[in-house]
Image (cartoon, coloured by chain):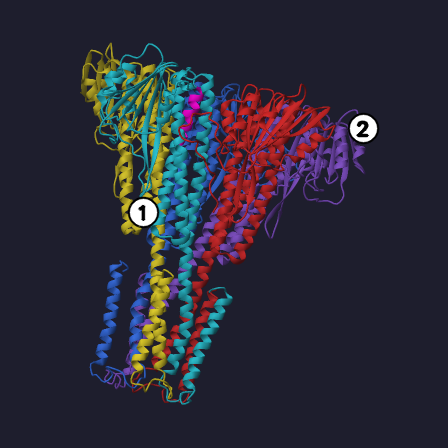
Chain colours: A blue, B yellow, C cyan, D red, E purple
Amino acid sequence: MSKPRKLRSRKAGLPPGSLVHIGEIKTSEASYSLIDFSRHSHVEKTLSAAGEFAGAPAQGTRWANVYGLHDPQSLATIGTLFGLHPLVQEDILNTAQRQKVDSYENYLYIVLHRYELKHEPLELQQDQISLVVGRDFLLTFQERPSKTFEPVRQRLRAEHNVLRGGGPGMLAYSLIDAVVDSYFSLIEQLGEHAEQLENEILHQAKPSTLEGIHQLKRCISGLRRDLYPLREVLAALNRDACGFFDSEIQLYLRDVYDHSVHIIETLEDLRDLSTGLLDVYLSTVSHRLNLEVRTLTVAATIFMPATLLAGIFGMNFHTMPLLDNPEGFTLALGGMGTIAAIMLALFWRRKHL
Amino acid sequence: MSKPRKLRSRKAGLPPGSLVHIGEIKTSEASYSLIDFSRHSHVEKTLSAAGEFAGAPAQGTRWANVYGLHDPQSLATIGTLFGLHPLVQEDILNTAQRQKVDSYENYLYIVLHRYELKHEPLELQQDQISLVVGRDFLLTFQERPSKTFEPVRQRLRAEHNVLRGGGPGMLAYSLIDAVVDSYFSLIEQLGEHAEQLENEILHQAKPSTLEGIHQLKRCISGLRRDLYPLREVLAALNRDACGFFDSEIQLYLRDVYDHSVHIIETLEDLRDLSTGLLDVYLSTVSHRLNLEVRTLTVAATIFMPATLLAGIFGMNFHTMPLLDNPEGFTLALGGMGTIAAIMLALFWRRKHL
Amino acid sequence: MSKPRKLRSRKAGLPPGSLVHIGEIKTSEASYSLIDFSRHSHVEKTLSAAGEFAGAPAQGTRWANVYGLHDPQSLATIGTLFGLHPLVQEDILNTAQRQKVDSYENYLYIVLHRYELKHEPLELQQDQISLVVGRDFLLTFQERPSKTFEPVRQRLRAEHNVLRGGGPGMLAYSLIDAVVDSYFSLIEQLGEHAEQLENEILHQAKPSTLEGIHQLKRCISGLRRDLYPLREVLAALNRDACGFFDSEIQLYLRDVYDHSVHIIETLEDLRDLSTGLLDVYLSTVSHRLNLEVRTLTVAATIFMPATLLAGIFGMNFHTMPLLDNPEGFTLALGGMGTIAAIMLALFWRRKHL
Amino acid sequence: MSKPRKLRSRKAGLPPGSLVHIGEIKTSEASYSLIDFSRHSHVEKTLSAAGEFAGAPAQGTRWANVYGLHDPQSLATIGTLFGLHPLVQEDILNTAQRQKVDSYENYLYIVLHRYELKHEPLELQQDQISLVVGRDFLLTFQERPSKTFEPVRQRLRAEHNVLRGGGPGMLAYSLIDAVVDSYFSLIEQLGEHAEQLENEILHQAKPSTLEGIHQLKRCISGLRRDLYPLREVLAALNRDACGFFDSEIQLYLRDVYDHSVHIIETLEDLRDLSTGLLDVYLSTVSHRLNLEVRTLTVAATIFMPATLLAGIFGMNFHTMPLLDNPEGFTLALGGMGTIAAIMLALFWRRKHL
Amino acid sequence: MSKPRKLRSRKAGLPPGSLVHIGEIKTSEASYSLIDFSRHSHVEKTLSAAGEFAGAPAQGTRWANVYGLHDPQSLATIGTLFGLHPLVQEDILNTAQRQKVDSYENYLYIVLHRYELKHEPLELQQDQISLVVGRDFLLTFQERPSKTFEPVRQRLRAEHNVLRGGGPGMLAYSLIDAVVDSYFSLIEQLGEHAEQLENEILHQAKPSTLEGIHQLKRCISGLRRDLYPLREVLAALNRDACGFFDSEIQLYLRDVYDHSVHIIETLEDLRDLSTGLLDVYLSTVSHRLNLEVRTLTVAATIFMPATLLAGIFGMNFHTMPLLDNPEGFTLALGGMGTIAAIMLALFWRRKHL
């Protein structure tokens, strides 16, 4: 059975805003990359240290990406460079955040989750993605390298792409869209897993199947609970009052919002399905018990009269009918067979065979 | 067991607004038809290509209908002709949308679903219908040819019909009404199916019955979840602020809204019924187990004392009572019969037979 | 098991506002009656045709009542006389409406339900009552003759009754109050039925009891679902903005609203009770299974050792103890008895008897 | 099993506002008492008839209390004296009201419930208390004499008590507080009852235990449902717009509101506990079934092989091994014992003993 | 099974605002401590009596802490010194409050809960913490000494800590944050307990396991119910209109609010897990029953035919086949073995072994 979402407690006694990495370290080395782009320019760099993010271009947008969050020192550097509030810095390092959006005067802080499905036992592995959307920059913090944003980088490289001219708002939308899209395939995988379980139940249910159903239910209910805040995040971005997204981008955000609602509804369907699987499993188990008891009943009611008859003719009374009769044995066996046949016929009529 | 609603993921990496058909292709050839009407005129045409939709009439309303959505090129043509936003075009092609209404400056974009009930296994097949309601045009996009809108076409052909003078708003209402009406017969079919299942349970419950119940529950809960957005769509149209529907049509829309609420409530009734069926099924199964065990108990308690008696008189003690008695055998049999009769009587009194 | 509320689909293809009777015809002949009243006058007439409703009195209020809705022609006549919107006319004929209130410029259209409890199988029969409350008239449309409004008619006949001077608003309130009051006795009947079922479960539960519980649950949940809209109707009338009810009547309407809430809460209690009945039933069935298995176990463990002993002394070994002993048989029987007694004692101690 | 809250239907046909006592008569004789108080005076009287309430003091507050509601005539007298609306008079007599507050121009009408717990069967007996809070008077109507308000009377008698100067608002608060406080001990009694049931389940569960659990659940859910309106009443009093309570009393009312929320939450805890009891009960029953079947299985698998062996050596073949052997009998018994020992060992290993 | 939250009823008859300690006395001696701090000063004192809190410093903030609430007299002294409303004083002494915040003109009154997990039986022990946040003072009342606030005291001692300059608002935030943080480790302990139970279920489920699951469920649901008001408290502080918290502290409070939501969601996960545990437990129990019955069935169907055969050859007919045959005995045994082998093979094929 998979484990519940972990809550890693802040080290007791630390004042709020203290920079301490909380959570599993998922990559051994942090890496930094930078894309400066405007409608007509595009520069892509891999940096060796967080300090090199300094010196933004006069024009255009800077997208700074960080993989690996175990080094509070680097984050403090970036925080100072881009003017991040201590609480934001703390939240970026704490990878046990809910999905949320916090708006500050000069930037939006957005927390998103990306999931990966692990099998045997079925478990969802969650990565936290932090986005900071500024007026002329966008920061992304991820726990480890991933391909999720690769298509967006590809599009930025293309000269005439609409992304180039859209600023941090358009870029943020594209990244959020990429994350939400990744849920679609996640849900497809869960759906396929559910179908496998269904086959197993109908053809060879065993106790491990039950565990499988529970793992599935747990994944689904955990994911579902995490998606409600995602929906709220998207609704909040749609209402965004501070002007990080222009009206055209709002239309696109409404579209992503619709997707999130659609994903939640599909999860509800999946949850119904997995609850149905549990019912079918339990009913299958109880059907088997019926079959066992039926077998026992049939066997007992056929053999017990015959055994009694054999016992009767095995009694030692001096005067007993049939014993001298040369056909006696055959008659006795015939009697047993007849009783058994009658019993079977009765069961047949009661649809017990 | 029927499958959960499919979420077909957008091809990862594609920018939003890319025109790609997503979903099963349900008709091999797309077809285009056109109705231009005003209070005093009516022209109906079948077109061979999407481009021919160009050139709207000076007066009156143009209703353009498309069956088959697998050709992004044609859709792009139509989109350009009527000035549709790229996101609208993308949504029309993606047949895995929720029911919704999006309002744009010059048109409303409405997504509706039509259902068909498939038997063995019981499954709902969903078709997406997209409506674009403009100031002087109405576009409908359907996945495949269907008779749902035929009655509306008939009424348009009649010279003095109120539809003729109502413009795109009145036409849109009529189409929505036709779709919502189709749910009524759908629900009647589900109700009849439920009654069949009920008969099966009471007279010859078998494991496949359980599957049937679950398919029914799944259909109902899926449909129910899809109808909540429909209700919201209708409520939103009722509140329509942009003036696509005049106050008279609003009255009619309120009526359709009432219908949708009524349908949802009937589905709740059906869901209660199917949950009740499950309870009755499980209780029937457990009742049968009781009967089996009872049979076994009765048989055992009747034959075991008799067999013991036979065994006792089969012992080889030299000195045993009755063995020499010529009536011994009869007495022994009588004893067995008496014990069996007492046992049966006891069961009878405990209402076990 | 009783059936879910029927949704009778409008004949597909008919334009909205078409007058077609939908639903079971509950009375073979329609009948029309008329009461014109003011503070000082009271005229009561039975009419032979709908057309005779024409010619309202100069002063006072006209209450026109129709029993039987299968004749669309008559309704059209009445509709024209009192200026009813086509949708209202359609809704009056369609006896599968939700309880609702629609407000039009010159009248309120109210749909209410009256229930009758049928036994074996337990089923609620629903009659639709349509009220049209105008400025100086009140129309009531009922599916068949009923005594529900008789007390109101009595009061109208009394010269100094407050109803006489209250106009259509006061009359409408009195009729609604009469309908809501009829729910009280309905719920009392359901409560008595529940108590009967409870007795049956505790003393002689049988499979038909389970069906009875489910019928009860179905009735309760159907009724409960239908009462929520009733509560909304009453809340809406309380808020009535168009001045059909003066502030004094509002007080009375608030009282009826309280009654409806009270009825819903009592239904919730009844639902809890019926769910409890199901639990007790299932637990009773499972208790019986335990008793059966216990009997079987006791019988088996008492007779099997004895039978073994008999079998042992029935073996044909040449050298066996006790066989020559004249007390052997008695000793063997004593052994059997002793073992049985020990077994019974053990069961007794484990509280198995 | 305790009964659901009774709804006593108004006598059909009676006009609203008719004064008819509805409900059980709980005291044979009505009694009337009166307290006139101001900061410096205090007069307490027992009256012999309702009419003597007339003639309020020039200054201060009059608290009129009535025990016993079966005499509509007296109530009409009081109604006239204090100017009560006919609906209020009707509601006071109908002891099947929800808890509620209705505000009229010159007074507030408040309905509260007081409960008493009856044992065997566990049942809640409900008394209705009606309060009418006027500008210079307070009326209380109770179904029968009770000690609930005694402490408040005591405090009124004390010369310098803050109650004396607080007017009807402060007095009303004190009475409401006394009623809400009485719920605390009620809930403690329910909690103790739940603990008793728990002991019974763990040590000697029997069918009557199940009934006990259901009675408890019914009491809790009924009480819980009745407390939601109480909370609303208190919230409404807090918001009181008509100035019956000054801002200091508002603080106290907020405190009572908090108590009501606390009581509801404790009831939720109790409900969880009783649901848990049901699970434990059912699981105990099913555990016992397992024990029975286990006993049966062990007995059968030990004795059946031995019985077979005895049967084999009891066959009448002329040539059989061991029969002539003087140790044959001992060997056979040894074989039986060995098989039984092996069986027991196998069960032991499978943790079946 | 752990007990539901206790509601200790106020002594009946006492007027509101009476100072009486309600609840268990958790420390034998009350202790008082005092910290006066400003940006540049810090004085820490332990006092011997409540009266010594008098005489606040001209500048800076006074934090007065009380451990032990059983002495109403001391509280009255403090109440007078700091001007607390009688209701606040009463609530501080009554340790059965909900978590809440009440705002008064000159101070906020906040009730929080701290929990400790007791094992065997699993139980949550609740301590109430009352905070009174004034303009230049902060009072804390705790039921007994605890280390929860120690880190905050440490930080106050450090000269340049931001806490020093933040006034009562910043201090209050820090204390609240410390309490909320303590929930994280509480939930981790509950999670570990759940994992232990899971192991127990899968490897050696026994009735006490069921009790363990129920204790866990009870703890979780009790805690969850208590956290909803905590969330409301934090939301209310966030909206704080009276200016006890400046905008910077608001940011920090929003962060604590997020934590509380996160904790609630993790509890939901835990609840799902414990419900899943119950299902697995029940299913394990029912699986064992199946195994028992299967064993019984296999044994019975193998031994019953053999026993019958032995009985047949033990009959005393004079003319019976095989008896004279020297191979007869071997043949009979072979027959028995063959039948048993066939039976086993059949079971094998039906996957019954």
Question: Does D24 appear above or below C243?
Answer: below
Chain designation of label 2: E
Q: Viewed as shown, does residue D142 lie left or right of E61?
A: left
Residue B3: % across, % down: 33, 41
Which residue extends farthest front?
D48
Label 2 in the same subunit as label 1: no
Chain designation of label 1: B
Residue D254 shows up from this direction? yes
Q: Which residue is mark 1?
A: B211
Residue E246: % across, % down: 65, 24
Identify the amino acid type marked 1: Glu
| Residue at image location 44% in from the left, 64% down from the top | D294
Q: Which mark is residue D244?
A: none
Bounds of the magenta segment: C227-239
Q: What is the quadrant of residue B123 in the picture?
A: top left
Q: How many marks?
A: 2
Q: What is the quadrant of residue B189 in the picture?
A: top left
Q: Viewed as shown, does residue C268 lie left or right of B289?
A: right
Question: Looking at the rendering, in which quadrant would you find the C terminus of chain A?
Answer: bottom left
Secondary structure state at the residue bearing disc 1: helix
Q: Viewed as shown, does residue E128 lie left or right of D12?
A: right
Q: Nearer the viewer, residue C190 or B278?
A: C190
Image marks 2 and 1: residues in contact by CB distance under 8 Å: no
Residue C72: % across, % down: 23, 22
Q: Nearer the viewer, residue D124 or C101?
A: D124
Question: Does B44 appear above or below B118?
Answer: above
Classed neighbour count for the residue bearing mark 2: other residues with Cα under 10 Å, few (<14), some (14–19), many (≥20): few
Residue D183 part of the magenta-drawn span: no
Magenta stretch prevailing secondary structure: helix
Identify the amino acid type marked 2: Gly
Q: Which mark is residue E55?
A: 2
Classed neighbour count for the residue bearing mark 1: other residues with Cα under 10 Å, few (<14), some (14–19), many (≥20): some
